Amino acid sequence: MPKITIKDGKLSAEIYVQVTREYVCSCGTKSTITMNMPEGVSYNGKINVNANCSTCNEPVVIAEGHHYIENHTLLTK
């Protein structure tokens, strides 16, 4: 089982994995997001990515849902 801790509102883990996710901005620009995430963790809600669209400069936000990692890909149910 992955070991994670939350301290002062910050999530940390012993093991991080690099994941990718296809993203389409509201302006239509398609891109691939690559980020490091704690192994074995799933998220409920939206994910604010520390990046902006290269075309319109809108903040990159992965929509609301249940997010999980499978085969180094960030998926949403």
Image (cartoon, helix red, strand yellow):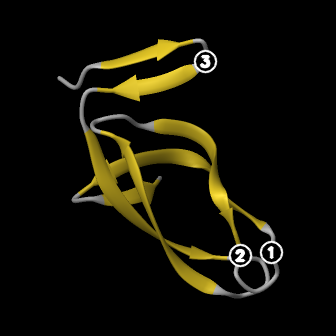
Image coordinates of residue 52 in percent, x first then y, are: 71, 68
SS state under label 3: loop
> Neighbour class for label 3 at 10 Å: few (<14), some, many (≥20)?
few
Q: Nearer the viewer, residue 1 or 36?
A: 36
Left or right relative to 68: residue 32: right
Q: Position of residue 38 (x, y in %)?
A: 35, 37
Location of the N terminus by quadrant is: top left
Query: Residue at 40% across / 15% down in the picture?
Result: 5
**Residue 51 in the image: above or below residue 66:** below
Residue name at image x 72 percent, y 87 percent? 28
Mark 2 element type: loop
Residue 53's mark?
A: 2
Q: Amino acid at mark 1?
A: Asn
| Residue occupying image coordinates x 48% and y 25% | 11
Disc 2 to disc 1, C-alpha distance: 5 Å
* Lower sequence index among marks 3 and 2: 3
- In the foreground, 18 or 45: 18
- In the image, residue 3 sits, relative to residue 48, either above or below, namely above
* Residue 62 shows in this picture: no
What whole-number distance in Å separates the C-alpha atoms at marks 3 and 2? Answer: 27 Å
Asked if the residue under mark 1 is in contact with the one under mark 2, i.e. CB atoms within 8 Å, the reply is yes
Give the CA distance from mark 3 to mark 1.
28 Å
Using a 10 Å C-alpha cutoff, classify the residue at mark 1 as few (fewer than 14 neighbours), some (14 to 19) or many (20 or more).
few
Q: Quadrant of residue 25?
A: bottom right
Residue at 55% across, 81% down:
31
- Image check: 71 left or right of 4? left
Q: Looking at the picture, does residue 41 appear above or below residue 6?
A: below
Residue position for label 1:
57
Marks 3/1 in contact by CB < 8 Å: the verdict is no
User: Mark 2 belongs to which amino acid?
Assistant: Cys
Residue 46 in percent (x, y) is at 65, 46
The label number, if any, that marks residue 9 in the structure image: 3
